[in-house]
Structures are given as C-alpha cells and as structure tokens.
C-alpha cells in the first residue's frame, strides 16, 4: 500500500514513517502543489495526505485506487468534497491538533491590543518612557470588555474559557449550536446583529464555506462599535478585505488583528501592511512543537484506520460509507 503526501510543513516525516512502517504502508513525500505533479504521483496511491495543495475534481477523477484523503489541518476547503464523495473516497480532517494554540493566539492578540503592547514598544524605541508615552484614549480594563465569537466550535470554546479567566463577558453567534450548549460554558447566544453591536473584540472561528465567505463586509463593519477590533485566526476569505480596508480608512472600527489573509503570502504592497491599527502574523496561530507532532501523528493514524477498513475518527463525508 502506498500513501502520498502532496505538501507538508514538517521538518521530517519520522513520526508518520514509523506509524506506516508498522502497517506495511509505503510513504512518498512530494512537497508539490501543482495539479499535474500531484496527479502524476498520486494516481496509483491508496491514500493521500494533503497540506495546502488544491485537490479539485480533475485530481480526484485521476485517482485510480485512493480510499482516503487526509487534510493536514482543521479546514478542508481545498478538497473537492462532492467529487471525492462521488468516487467513494473518504475525506478526513484533523480538527483537534491545535485547539489550545489557536485559542491562545487569538487571546494573545486581544491582550496585545488591550495593553497597547506594540505602541509601548514603539515608544521605547523612540526614546520615550512612562505611562504617558502612548495614547491612553479609550484605554479600558480587559475585564470590562465583551468578547464576541463568530462560530462556536472547539477553538472558540477554548477561547471563551480563557477569556472568562480575564473576567470578560462572552457572547457568540453560531446557528448550529444551541442556547443551552453555550450557556453551559458561560457564553450568551446572540444573533449576528447583536454580536456585531455588543462586541469590543470580535473573534472569528468559522470554517470557510459558501455561507461564511465574505461574511464580514461594509454592512457588518458599520454595525460594529467604532472602538471595536476584529480578530481573525480562521480563514482569510471570511473577511472581504477591500471592505476591511475601507472600514479602517473611514474609522468604522478601531483595528484588525489577522493571522490569515485572503491571499497568502501578501505581496510587499498589500494595503493592510504597515498600518498602526493592524496586527499581522504569518498564519502561525496553530503552530507549536506539540501541535506539529500531533498533526503528523493523528493524520497518519487516520490513514491507517482507513486502509485497514476501519472508520476514521474525523470523517467529514460519512455518506460515502453508505454508497
């Protein structure tokens, strides 16, 4: 049996190799994303592990004996799910490898904003010192702020737990989670408009779907507080970037802290770069030594389950089993 890894972020594949060796599975690593190269190497593979490569219908239709595609991450929007399902190929993600990391990162961004860390550092480098070295306009205690959560999955729940440690009020919008389930974690369920109106920090934690793509545009920014910040550690296209730029220019909102962009990496002229009211990190929220090892290990274990005829733990198209 053969597993192909199209592209991956790991310095070595020792963990996956050890797991596959115990089960008689050969491993081929490509480090390629272009369609033709992926097809050439994966055509006869029994399983695929995929980083950021796009596995569209053309790729799926070229696979001769693939049983499972494992997306090395939480989101799986780069895999054509209907095409895979029609070919009876299981699609699996790894949703639980970075819950702590991403919720930590989103909370860290809020604290950096709330405590004016970056302006403080800039002031020191300019030779200024003391609390009056920076602008304290609208400078409030964290515990007096409201955290809004767009989406209420694993990561949002982890963030809510951390925010409650800072005594923040938490509200969330997610049409797929009940009021009772949110209340059990100390979070108030609200509709989207109320989420926008009440949030001092609005943190996005939704997958990228047809419903969430460009979910945040001018209408949403106009509804938010002019002192509010938007935090995005989910997927870049959830925000319509040209509308965000206008919202920042027109001071509809105070700022944005983003770990993801619509197009990555940005070019040197990207209009969100070098703004004092924008914090950008390089799509790093999910990453620690621990999460990296968990991702490789859990991804490889899902391949083994599928090739042994077992149901993967995180099957995203379960209907394929009834075909």
Image (spheres, rainbow, N blue to C red):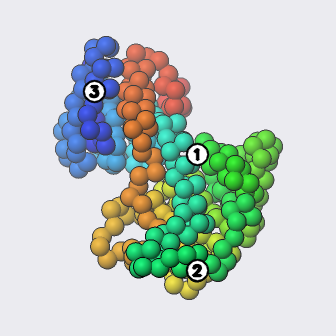
Looking at the image, which residue sits at the far bottom?
A: 250
Q: Mark on residue 132?
A: 2
User: Which of the pair 174/284 is nearer the observer?
Assistant: 284
User: Which one is closest to the eye, mark 2 or mark 1?
Assistant: 2
**Residue at 42% over, 42% down:** 288
Q: Label 3: few (<14), some or many (≥20) within 10 Å?
A: few
**In the drawing, does residue 70 fall left or right of residue 31?**
right
Q: Are marks 2 and 1 in contact (CB under 8 Å)?
A: no
**In the drawing, does residue 273 fall left or right of residue 138?**
left
Q: Which residue is mark 3?
A: 14
In the image, residue 89 sits, relative to residue 76, either above or below, namely above
Can the viewer see residue 7?
yes
Q: Secondary structure at mark 2?
A: helix
Q: Earlier in the sequence, mark 2 or mark 1?
A: 2
In the image, residue 64 sits, relative to residue 249, either above or below, namely above
**Residue at 40% over, 15% down:** 308
Q: CA distance from mark 1 to mark 3?
A: 28 Å
User: Which one is closest to the eye, mark 2 or mark 3?
Assistant: 2
Q: Mark on residue 318?
A: none
Q: Earlier in the sequence, mark 1 or mark 3?
A: 3
Q: Which residue is mark 1?
A: 155
In percent of width and height, residue 205 lies at: 58, 53
In the image, residue 258 sits, relative to residue 64, either above or below, namely below
């Amino acid at each position: 049996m053969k597993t192909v890894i199209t592209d991956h972020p790991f310095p070595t594949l020792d963990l996956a190799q050890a797991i596959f060796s115990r089960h008689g599975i050969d491993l081929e690593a490509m480090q390629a994303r272009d369609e033709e190269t992926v097809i050439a190497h994966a055509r006869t593979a029994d399983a695929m592990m995929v980083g950021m490569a796009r596995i569209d219908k053309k790729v799926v239709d070229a696979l001769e004996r693939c049983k499972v595609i494992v997306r090395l991450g939480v989101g799986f929007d780069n895999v054509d799910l209907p095409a895979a399902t029609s070919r009876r190929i299981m699609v699996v993600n790894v949703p639980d490898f970075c819950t702590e990391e991403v919720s930590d990162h989103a909370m860290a961004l809020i604290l950096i904003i709330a405590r004016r860390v970056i302006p403080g550092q800039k002031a020191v480098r300019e030779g200024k010192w003391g609390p009056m070295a920076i602008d304290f306009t609208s400078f409030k205690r964290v515990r007096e702020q409201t955290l809004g959560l767009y989406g209420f999955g694993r990561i949002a729940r982890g963030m809510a737990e951390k925010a409650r440690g800072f005594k923040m009020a938490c509200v969330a919008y997610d049409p797929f989670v009940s009021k009772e389930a949110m209340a059990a974690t100390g979070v108030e369920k609200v509709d989207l408009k109320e989420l926008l109106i009440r949030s001092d920090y609005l943190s996005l934690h939704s997958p990228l779907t047809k419903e969430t793509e460009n979910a945040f545009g001018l209408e949403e920014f106009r509804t938010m507080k002019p002192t509010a910040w938007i935090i995005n550690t989910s997927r870049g296209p959830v925000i319509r970037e040209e509308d965000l730029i206008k919202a920042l220019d027109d001071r509809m909102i105070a700022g944005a802290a983003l770990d993801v962009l619509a197009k990555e990496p940005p070019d040197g002229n990207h209009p969100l770069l070098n703004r004092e009211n924008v914090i950008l990190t390089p799509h790093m929220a999910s990453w620690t030594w621990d999460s990296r090892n968990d991702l490789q290990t859990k991804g490889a274990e899902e391949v083994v389950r599928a090739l042994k005829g077992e149901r993967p733990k995180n099957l995203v198209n379960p209907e394929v089993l009834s075909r």
